[in-house]
Amino acid sequence: MNRTPSSDTGYAGYIRFKKLFLLGMVLLTVVIALVAITCGSSGLTVGTVIRTLLGGGDKNSKIIVLNLRLPRTVTAIVAGVGLAVVGCVLQSILRNPLASSSTLGVSQGAAFGAAFAIIVLNAGMQSQTLDGVSFSNPYTISVCAFVGSMLSTLVVLGLSRVSKVTPQTMILAGVALSSLFSGGTTLLQYFADDVKVAAVVFWTFGSLGSTSWREIGIMALVVLSALVYFLFNRWSYNALQSGEATAKGLGVNTNRLLLSSMVVCSLTASVIVSYIGIINFIGLIAPHLMRRVIGSDYRYLLPASALMGAVLLLLSDTVARLAVAPVVLPIGAITSFLGAPLFLYLIFKGGKR
């Protein structure tokens, strides 16, 4: 089918709009990150923050910006990008608008692993601070949380390989695994003392303030690698939007794409939740918001979802720090307040169709 000059102009304008939108999202992310670093009781200005980031500023501003707020802000950006692109890809390969790391049991598996480390392996609470809880062995908790989340992934992947279940059935398997891991976490808490129960509860709240630069570097490396892999397969995800048969006709190995994408998604989500705890709904909200603006072209939807995930988590963390300052609210609660209404909206919208 030949394109007319007017249709070419219209398409080129639409692509230009998407590129400009992505540029605007980058600028918005930078602005919100600066605001997030500025907000707080120390009275820092944006100019002071910029000077400190460029190597200037006094000793006090360097301690506040470089040691306290910058790591938290970078953690929010990296985790937001990772969770958002994971949700975006899962919704494509499973062809389900409700797919995310939470609905596949990855987050609940991580919570069980963390509870096991805190209660059984004695990696529990060491001291209580204004921001929450300090753990005696955080690396043990992270490793066990990672193992728990990957265990859930392996079960779901095993079902897809052995029983040849449909992508929709994999969501149901994730829901069942979520219930199973939640029950296991409850039993562990039932037999634990109050101190360890408090530590488990605090970990499940989610926290962006407990990561070091080493942990941030590990998360960033995993998230960047996953994003590169997803962008490399962007045309395959586009083909899947027209159905599995059409994708196969275009030369896409759908089975291999499903398995490899599931592994990368689960690995990325597992690393993130093992370090920062349970952060719900970012992977659900960000892709849906971006689809309404730039459509389902994964060339642009993936980076747009990544940037929106960073923006949402930055905003949520800023609200959590400022709402009842100096107390820091659980970041997981804030993101749940954002995501739950959209989750219900999608359910009701699907029911009407």
Image (spheres, helix red, strand yellow):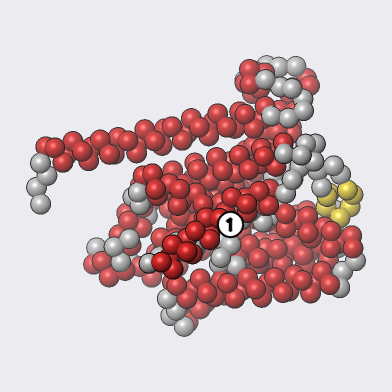
Q: Is residue 45 visible?
A: yes
Q: How many marks?
A: 1
Task: Work out whether residue 251 or residue 239 is closer to the camera in this orientation and state it.
Answer: 239
In the rendered image, which quarter is residue 66 located in? top right
Furthest residue toward bottom = 163
Q: Residues within 10 Å of mark 1 (few under 14, many from 20)?
A: some
The local secondary structure at tag 1 comes to helix
* Image coordinates for residue 64, horizontal then vertical, percent: 75, 28
Residue 341 placed where, x, y %?
56, 55
Rendering coords of residue 324 (x, y %): 76, 39
Check the image and report above or below for 79 versus 50.
below
Given residues 80 and 55, the one toward you in this image is 80
325 is higher (above) or lower (below) than 199: above
| Residue toward you, 57 or 346 | 346
Q: Residue at x 50, y 32 (%)?
A: 28
Tell me if 14 is positioned left or right of 92 in this view: left
Q: Residue at x 41, y 66 (%)?
A: 352
The part of the image, by quadrant, that contains residue 97 is bottom left
User: Residue at the spot x=68%, y=52% of the render?
Assistant: 333
Of the residues shown, which amino acid type is indicated by label 1?
Ala
Q: Quadrant of the C terminus?
A: bottom left
Q: Residue at the spot x=65%, y=65% of the render?
A: 108
Q: Is residue 283 above or below residue 181?
A: above
Q: What residue sits right under mark 1 in the picture? A: 340
Q: Picture coordinates of residue 9 (x, y %)?
A: 18, 36
Any part of residue 55 in sight: no
